Image (spheres, rainbow, N blue to C red):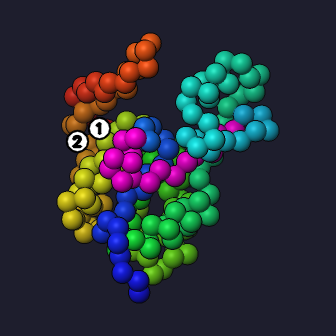
Amino acid sequence: MSEKTGRRIAVVTDSTSDLPHELADEHGIRIIPQVLIMGTKTWRDGVDIDPPAFYELLQTSPDFPASSQPSVADFREAFEELAKDADGIAAILVSDELSGTINSARMAKESLPDVPIEIVDTRSVSAQLGFIAIAAAQAAAAGADLQTVADTARAMIGKEAGDAFLVTTPAGERAYVVEEVKFV
């Protein structure tokens, strides 16, 4: 087996976490994009289209938007790439009750029996999911093993934490405003 050069445990989430790419990069989190659909066109969320462009389409398109979970192949490709430099992968994902994302991740995991992967159903979406993914990434950065990273994420489900709002000024400056909330 090749020598591992990256972090011991890799953390993955999906784009419903609404993590800005800069924040995900800062914490070493890989974001798997959901698929956005409008009419006959599709985009990978955060890759082919950003939120302002999508919101513009919502106002101008006669088509009703839809979405689809990432494919099994999307997860498999990410897992294989991350496994080259990690001892395990923690996939911190959108609620199974809201999306088929976890099912795609599970199927990818089953196709890679030699890669240790923990899949966490956060039972949340958006900022809550993002905060849970960040907590898992912080545990991984501190040297936690795969089970501890996954348990760190699971321990946040239903706990009080914070909610952040990204505020962009007319001049394009960004600031995070954090308020206390309870994860449900």
In percent of width and height, residue 102 lies at: 50, 56
- Which amino acid type is marked by label 1? Phe
x and y percentages locating residue 78 in the rendered image: 52, 63
Circle 2: element type: loop
Above or below for 157 versus 76:
above
Left or right relative to 158: residue 11 = right
Going 57% across and 34% down the picture, which residue do you hit?
50
Looking at numbered disc 2 in the image, what kind of residue is underneath it? Lys
Task: Identify the residue shown where x is 60% and y is 24%.
Answer: 55
Q: Position of residue 16 (x, y in %)?
A: 48, 41
Write down the region rendered in magenta. 22-37
Q: Is residue 98 left or right of residue 38?
A: left
For the point 25% across and 53% down, the residue is 138
Distance between mark 1 and mark 2 Cα atoms? 5 Å
Assess disc 1: are there few (<14), some (14-19) or many (≥20) residues with their C-alpha within 10 Å of its C-alpha.
some
x and y percentages locating residue 117 in the rendered image: 40, 69
Identify the residue at image location x=55%, y=30%.
Answer: 51
- Residue 90 in the magenta stretch? The answer is no
Q: Is residue 170 left or right of residue 3?
A: right
**Res. 162 image quadrant:** top left
Residue 74 lies in quadrant:
bottom right
Say if 161 sits above or below 29 in the image: above
Relative height, residue 34 to residue 106 (above, below): above
The residue identified by callout 1 is 183
Give the residue at the far bottom of this rendering: 1
Secondary structure category for the residue under label 1: loop
Residue 148 is left or right of residue 95, and the answer is: left
Tags 1 and 2 touching, CB below 8 Å: yes
The residue that label 2 is drawn on is: 159
Q: How packed is label 2: few (under 14 Cα within 10 Å), some, or many (20 or more)?
A: few
